[in-house]
Image (cartoon, grey):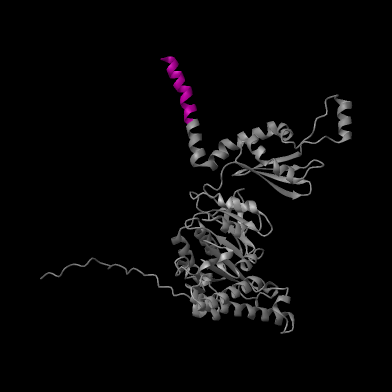
Amino acid sequence: MADFTALLEVGGPVAAIGGGAAYARAKHPGLYWSTVGLPISTVRLLSSYTSTMDACGLTVQPPRWRALAIKATTRREVRPVPPRRGLIRPTSTGLRIRLRLAPGQEPADIAASAERLRHAWGVHAVYVRDIKPGVVELRLVGFDVLRKVRMPRRTADDFLWLPVALREDATAFVRDYRTVPHELLLGATLSGKSMYLRNLLTQLAAQPVVLVGIDCKRGVELAPFAARLSALATDPEQAAELLPVLVKEMEDRYDLIKARQGIAPGTPDEEITSDIWGLPEGERPTPIVLFIDEVAELFLIATRKEEERRDEMVTQLIRLAQLGRAAGIYLEVCGQRFGAELGKGATMLRAQLTGRVCHRVNDEASAKMALGDIAPEAAYAACAIAAERPGLAVAGDTSGGWSRIRTPYLSLADAAATCRATAHLAPDVPALTPFRPYVPPVPVKAPGPVTTPRPVTE
């Protein structure tokens, strides 16, 4: 009996601690990493750093003077040396450590061994970032940060600079319109494309930006945000009327830039290299962000008359994509399907869309259309997205870089409430007034009676 009691006294707390750690690892991975994973991974890294680097082929022979000094002083065997390690900096999601590369090494050598380092040090992933010549940073991620998205607390807040998603290396994915003016956003039904659009639109709603929408699904995607939109077209016929107005607005802004810089009025638009950001703040037009949902609906035709309308709309879209950046007009082109078979102009339009975000799609051709021209491996990664993880996407740009991202959850009711609360920030653009959507007033409940009514008695 005494032995059983002693076993309970020792085994009970051990079982409770083990069970609590297992529960935290499954349900609260951030807490588990901070309390258990971080100390264990740090000890593994410090104790096995040299041997791990040697096993990964990341060690080099020391300089000749150092080899001679070792032989002269200690007579020990001269062994290859790993990259010099800096201080270990823990974070809420992993570790960061800087390495000074040995002579003859390059960052690609470290990146090629990232998977081996991940297993050796017991972390979820290892990412390599080039800091400066001869110095790289290893970002060790302790758990799957995309399973339950929590955006970093410290993110820069700037105009047209919006952190809308989380990267797989625990950094924020930023939609920077000044750097990447136009973007192509693809995703099948229930893939999370609408969630990305909500986060982007609600963050833009808090800034003095003109928001324009073309939603060919009769407005079911963008109508909840009508309070903040300056213009909304809900079918191809309305879009055919709205796009020429935006093109005319772009031309007027070019004329403004010409007048300010003293350029001759007959100068072609393509020869102007400046933009609205060079104008004084008092004369600078307000930026315009155009959201196009279900872009394929603008390409589909059934009659010859619709073909003429389609050609005009596609031409105007391409003009906005080619020349809109300098005039402060930016495009967010969204759809479930995008391919060359949509018709004339589809490939030309895609070439002007620098940013690419591809959620789960129903066919490989759409993933290749979005990402295949910038990074073929990114297209394969997009095709591997599971339906059980909505919001997961592959983001890239025409520079060739890409990464997996996931958008935090934002309910439609909260997004619509944000747009209603920021409706007063919508700039007044007279040319877009005819396209301003109708916003029904919010019903107000009448206050109840001050006193409880009583029946009249005789």
Q: Is-magenta flag for residue 36?
A: no
Residue 342 vs 377, above or below: the answer is: below
Q: How many marks?
A: 0
The magenta region covers 1-16
Q: Which of the 4 quarters of the picture holds residue 445?
A: bottom left
Residue 9 vs 150, above or below: the answer is: above
Label the magenta part by its dominant secondary structure.
helix
What is the residue that sits farthest to the left in this orientation?
458
Residue 322 visible from this viewpoint: yes
Residue 152 visible from this viewpoint: no
Image coords of residue 138 (percent x, y):
69, 44
Q: Quadrant of the C terminus?
A: bottom left
Q: Quadrant of the N terminus?
A: top left
Choose between 307 and 334: the one closer to the eye.
Answer: 307
Image coords of residue 26 (percent x, y):
50, 39
Compared across the picture, whether 354 is left or right of 458 comes to: right
Q: Could you tell me which residue is drawn at 55 percent across and 62 percent down?
A: 200
Q: Could you tell me which residue is drawn at 43 percent across and 19 percent down?
A: 5
Image coords of residue 396 (percent x, y):
63, 56
Q: Could you tell me which residue is drawn at 50 percent across and 52 percent down?
A: 390
Choose between 153 and 223: the one closer to the eye.
Answer: 223
Q: Is-magenta flag for residue 4?
A: yes
Q: Could you tell me which residue is drawn at 60 percent across and 59 percent down?
A: 370
Q: Which of the 4 quarters of the picture holds residue 143?
A: top right
Residue 99 vs 247, above or below: the answer is: above
Image coords of residue 214 (percent x, y):
51, 71
Choose between 123 and 228: the one closer to the eye.
Answer: 123
Residue 352 vs 130, above or below: the answer is: below
